[in-house]
Image (cartoon, rainbow, N blue to C red):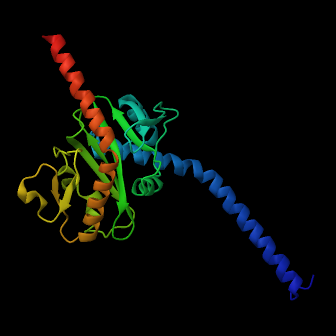
């Protein structure tokens, strides 16, 4: 074949494209399961860090298989709810088949549109419930997990992450343990909005539902404040019902002890 002809060029180009496509398809098919496993383990690390199941440093040193085991040993159950607070599904918590709702962007849109949503509630031993939050930072999505105690209003812990916030500024929502620690012990009143206040000098008033914004990271802090209020609002009906049930159970238990 004449290597200078148009036919040769077309055939050569087609062969190269086919080979490259085959190689990419092979790589994707082989790396896909590993990437999915890493993503699942990362989500579990973040949730369990918020719930204080293990120290954050320990969770990030553990292998993926150990993370699955630790989660299964400490989780009671996992459900999904709608905006009305009613359960609309369950998630498997068995070590070999852990199910998560980790695509939060579609749920975020559903919340804002007031449509159908599948919001996860991860209920750990000791009465700890973990819920996600999701929103927009300065350069991309930000998200996190908030752990509530048995009273369904006291924050036990929090963990936040981001896709591309500015190092040394907005990225502090993930990188600085002191920022996450500020949320521990805070309380959320799910009966009225706004549910939380993350802003400049928010703590000056001594409010139980306020944390100071990160200095120099105005847009990231605002995005996280918006995310907290949107998602806490989405869980308000569920949390109020759960709080009432917990209070009733405590009253019954106290009566039986007397």
**Residue drawn 42% across the image and 53% down it:** 114
Who is closer to the viewer here, 44 or 85?
A: 85
User: Residue 21 at x, y = what percent?
Assistant: 71, 65
| Image height of 176 relative to 247, above or below | below
Residue 83, x across and y down, in percent:
39, 45
- Left or right of residue 108: residue 10: right
Q: What residue is drawn where x is 18% and y is 54%?
A: 178
Res 236 → quadrant = top left
Work out whether residue 187 or residue 59 is closer to the camera in this orientation and state it: 187
Residue 220: horizontal and vertical position, in percent?
28, 66
Q: Work out which residue is located at the far left of the displayed protein and give it.
A: 205
- Residue at horizontal 13%, vertical 60%? 202
Position of 153 with respect to 106 (left or right) is left
Q: Please state if 200 lies on the left or on the right of 226 as rendered.
A: left
Query: Outermost residue toward the bottom?
Result: 4
Along the viewing direction, whichever of 231 and 68 lies nearer the viewer = 231
Task: Give residue 122's quadrant in the image.
Answer: top left
Relative image position of residue 63 (x, y in whole percent) = 42, 42
Q: Is residue 58 visible?
A: no
């Amino acid at each position: 074949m004449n290597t200078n002809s148009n036919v040769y060029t077309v055939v050569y180009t087609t062969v190269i494209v086919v080979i490259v496509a085959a190689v990419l398809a092979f790589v994707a098919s082989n790396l896909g399961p590993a990437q999915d496993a890493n993503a699942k383990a990362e989500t579990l690390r973040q949730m369990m860090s918020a719930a204080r199941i293990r120290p954050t440093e320990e969770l990030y040193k553990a292998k993926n298989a150990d993370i699955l085991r630790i989660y299964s040993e400490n989780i009671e159950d996992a459900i999904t709810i709608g905006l009305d607070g009613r359960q609309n599904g369950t998630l498997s918590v068995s070590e070999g088949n852990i199910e998560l709702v980790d695509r939060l962007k579609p749920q975020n849109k559903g919340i804002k549109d007031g449509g159908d949503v599948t919001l996860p509630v991860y209920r750990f031993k000791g009465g700890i419930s973990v819920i996600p939050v999701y929103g927009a930072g300065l350069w991309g999505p930000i998200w996190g997990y908030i752990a509530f105690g048995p009273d369904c209003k006291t924050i036990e812990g929090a963990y936040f992450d981001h896709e591309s916030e500015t190092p040394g500024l907005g990225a502090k929502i993930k990188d600085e343990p002191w920022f996450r620690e500020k949320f521990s012990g805070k309380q959320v009143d799910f009966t009225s909005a706004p549910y939380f206040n993350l802003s400049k000098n928010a703590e000056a008033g001594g409010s139980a539902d306020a944390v100071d914004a990160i200095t120099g990271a105005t847009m990231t802090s605002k995005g996280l404040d918006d995310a907290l209020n949107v998602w806490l609002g989405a869980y308000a009906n569920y949390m109020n019902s759960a709080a009432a049930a917990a209070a009733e159970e405590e009253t019954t238990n106290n009566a039986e002890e007397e």
